[in-house]
Amino acid sequence: MKAELIKKQVITGKDTLYVFRCPEIAEKALPGQFVEVKLSAEFFLRRPVSIFDCDGSETISLLVRSVGKGTEYMLSLAEGEVLDILGPLGQGFSLPAEPGKCLLVGGGIGLAPLYYLAKCLKKQGNDVQLFFSPRRDAQLLDAIDNDQFPAVIAENRKDIADRLPQSIEGMQYVFSCGPEGLLEQTALECIKKDIFCQVSMERRMGCGIDLCKGCVVAVYTENGLEYKKACCDGPVFDAKEVAFHEKP
């Protein structure tokens, strides 16, 4: 689909918010899904990016961290340019059937898919809170409307270990995206307390459409350990399924 860049906003020295007009994607996008962005002819593969926000009819927003040639190339884009964007792709977060207390656990750029989720949860009448780490990435919160939900910011790993269990206590639903260590800790705490939890797994997605098989996630099934693909079976998984330390 053709997508026109209508706004580019620098959030931090390495993170930029891009807003595209693309009704075909905006009308269908669900929280937790992603898109594949085609850059110039210099780049053979598209770049997978989580959907940060969506108005449901016209626009989608992408919060992108510049970590390689592709994402650095995006910094050169000017408003008005048109890109080829494929999406929405993947399995997103499952919204609660009944409103309740929800905690979003994000680490660094893992905040990206959580903002649209927060808006959808709020629209349903859920009580939404954010647990975010680490403090060095706190400026990323400038990309969101902080008045929509309170945020607890952890200073470091030790602080996470102390404060995350307290933040999860009393929650009915937990959703997480960020470093795998944070996802695992969140999953273990929720399993211990029998709290519904979903995690968004980051993998290198070469194609994004179930062709290259390069984005597998180890999961527990009734038949034992199996491998699912983040691009089509995920990127969102039930926290109880994920075998965090198993590698293909």
Image (cartoon, rainbow, N blue to C red):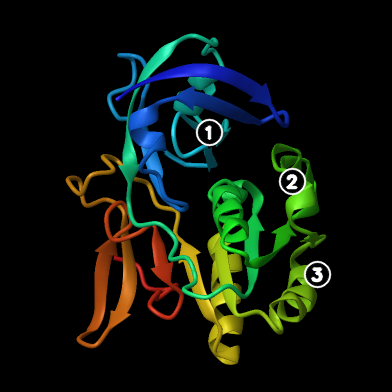
As drawn, the label of residue 61 is 1
Residue 55 x %, y %: 52, 37
Distance from the alpha carbon under mark 1 to that under mark 3: 31 Å
Viewer-nearest residue: 173 or 38: 173
- Residue picked out by circle 2: 137
Question: Along the polypeptide, which appears first: circle 1 or circle 3?
Answer: 1
The quadrant holding residue 45 is top left
The residue at 74%/57% (across/down) is 149
Residue 162 x %, y %: 79, 77
- In the image, 210: left or right of 152? left
- In the image, 54: left or right of 182? left
Compared with residue 17, is residue 176 higher up or lower down, i.e. above or below? below
Asked which secondary structure carries label 2, the reply is helix
Instruction: Mark 1 and mark 3 in contact? Answer it, CB < 8 Å.
Output: no
Check disc 3 and give the amino acid type.
Answer: Asp
- Residue picked out by circle 3: 159
